[in-house]
Amino acid sequence: MMLIYLLLLLLTTTISAHKPRHVTRNPPHQQPPHNALKLFTNSSSINIYNPLLGSALTISKSPNSPNNVTCTTSLSGGFSNTSTTDIFAIYGIYHLPRSNKIALAVITNSSLVVTNEMISAGSGSHVYKGGGIRRVTGLDLLEVPSSVVSKNSSNSQPGIFCADDVDQLRLLKKTFLSHELYFCESNCVDGSGGDVTHTLQRIFAENDNNVVAPEPDSRFHWNSQPSISLPSAFSTPVTSAFIGHFHLKSTTQILISRRSKHRAGVRFVMRGADKFGHCANFVESEQILIENGNGNGSSATTSHVQLRGSIPLKWSSPALLTSRNPPVSIGADPVEQARRMGRHFRGIFERYGDNLVTVLNLIDKNTSTRDKDKNRDQPRLGRAYESVFKALSDATKRGLEGQVRNVWFDFHNEVRGRRGVERLGNGGVGDLLYEGTGGAYSVGSDVISQGAFRIIFSHKSSKKSTIISTQNGIIRTNCMDCLDRTNVVQSLIALSVAERNLEDQGFDQGEGVEQKQNHLKHHRLLWSNNADALSTLYAGTRALKSDVTRTGRRTYGGAVDDGLNSLRRYVGNNFYDERRQEGVEVLIGGCLGGQMGMGKGKGKGKEKRVGRGKGLIFRIQKSGDELEGDEEEDDWDDADADAEGFLDNLDTDLASNFSLSKIFSDVFIAYLSYFLASRYLF
């Protein structure tokens, strides 16, 4: 048996090391355009000049001002006689109260990943501000000088921070590195177009055909709090997201998964809904399919949106060393539960229409002998949801039965064995995505009923567009984590939408058949990359069951890979997630110290010089396709370097660095992973 486990290890490590990942390559970072913001620092302030507006923003630390910072604008002719630095945008302001400091984050480099020409197939329409969506590839954190110099504290000296804040700065840098951030340039000549927080339907159909730019969607405006002190003319919405695309001869497909800032964090810390109805791991995934011109001077673009999010109740399941599936605690107040659920659905109706909201619940419905603890909690949580929903519906005047359809699809029970994936299709009345009426689930029928946003762009007029249809209603999918099972099902729903759209455009006959199959192959890889990106941020590893998303079937290699990732998740969830959660809260909140504690510094009494001079605290810049810190290490004390690197080393060792010197430890890991994988073979 040990030989079998060793062979399995060799197989899976080889697969992990050499398996193609279909990464959408981003272009190299681009220098700011000629109309870029101009940054200049003097001894008492940071000044940013906007050449288009002809005005300047002065930011300084002022003890007598709200939030300890002053932001003033004035007309200016620029800094013609001053050495300036071009930047793309201001990310926001961060407060370090223990050091009595203020820091400014600015975006110094970016790459254009989605263009307006791509969306409108070259018609020249203004879809997004600034020509498209940009990925942050360079960011500087600068210390804001003080307008009043105090001689009583060394903390007032530039570059001197208390040890606790040094630790928090290190945490902020790591969190910036781990998140992919996107934005649309606000500093542009033509103010029309939406920003990165909006779907195409919100930009066009709900905004008078994009005549006036809509306000940012607060759910996906990740830097709203850090930028709250900035004037609107100098504020640029930035979001955390996955964005990928592929371009073929006749079609282009883009996938944008916007992550909500509300209840953002890691899976065993952030669960359920808060008192405002915001759910953990809430993601809006927009699939955009573009037909690359049809020869008559116009092109069609279709947008379809899905949601995922934790079950909208008050519930939790903190990580537990003795179990990889910690017990679930459900709130006992039925009134509070109904209030949270009601607010959640009200928000969905307002933003996505009330034609029909399909809530697709993928958690286990029946207790099985395979994992009693896991399966006991999941049915209990599902029944609690049903009970609260019924009470809420009965208390509502119109009731919710006509607006919300609840579908409880026991994924693990229905999709059992390697061939069980077929139960997710639309071939028979018992399949999940069956498109006819009268099926056991008929989610495919709901997808058709809800429709999709479709717009025709004319190549004859640069701003002319015609809306053909809109999406009214949405599919909202969840499992326990809204990751692995959710990834599989959402990708198949999106696949059915893309396939139907291609067939409507004549790709089901002649040469179009081969083009359609090629498109759908790339579609699976794109959604698999999306699954890995979202899973890494919420659970700390790539997605489980990704072999189904990539290939459409379950494989033994994929099952063993799931076992390895489950082991990594167990280690990360129990030892590092609290620290990761604190980093997310610092990133969003704009105040170093977070909501979970005051950091892990060496003590407030100790002070340390930070940065590389000229007010620079740290710099993040792109290397290849990844964000990395500046190559020259910051002058920080790394004696307490956190153990997050252990996870990275563990992943690297198991994925590609197999060697005979580690044979015995790796055999043990293989045995453990194979044992875990047996539980994930559906």
Image (cartoon, rainbow, N blue to C red):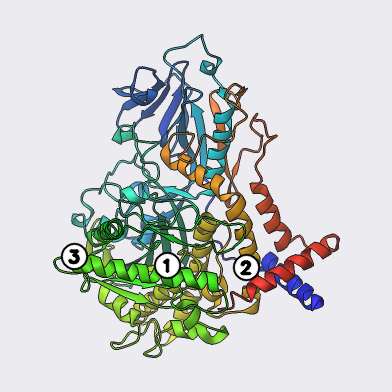
Mark whose residue sits in front, 2 or 1: 2
Q: Could you tell me residue 395's position as x and y percent?
A: 18, 65
Q: Could you tell me residue 639's position as x and y percent?
A: 70, 34
Seen from the viewer's position, the closer of residues 578 and 42 is 578
Q: Quadrant of residue 605?
A: top right
What amino acid type is highlighted by mark number 3? Ala
Please, is residue 196 above or below residue 103 in the view?
below
Q: Mark 2 — residue? A: 20
| Outermost residue to the front | 332
Residue at x 78%, y 78% (from the top left corner): 4
Q: Could you tell me residue 10's position as x and y percent?
A: 76, 71
Seen from the viewer's position, the closer of residues 671 and 196 is 671
Q: In the image, which disc is placed on residue 469?
A: none
Q: In the image, which disc is placed on residue 252?
A: 1
Q: Quadrant of residue 338?
A: bottom left
Q: In 3D space, how far apart are the residues under numbered discs 1 and 3 (Cα atoms)?
A: 46 Å
Q: Helix, strand, or loop for circle 1?
A: strand
Residue at x 56%, y 33% (from the top left corner): 618
Residue 680 in sight: yes
Asked if residue 78 lies left or right of residue 488, the reply is left
Q: In 3D space, how far apart are the residues under numbered discs 2 and 3 (Cα atoms)?
A: 52 Å
Looking at the rendering, in which quadrant would you find the C terminus? bottom right
What amino acid type is highlighted by mark number 2? Pro
Q: Earlier in the sequence, mark 1 or mark 3?
A: 1
Residue at x 45%, y 70% (from the top left corner): 378
What amino acid type is highlighted by mark number 1? Thr
Q: Mark 3 — residue? A: 395
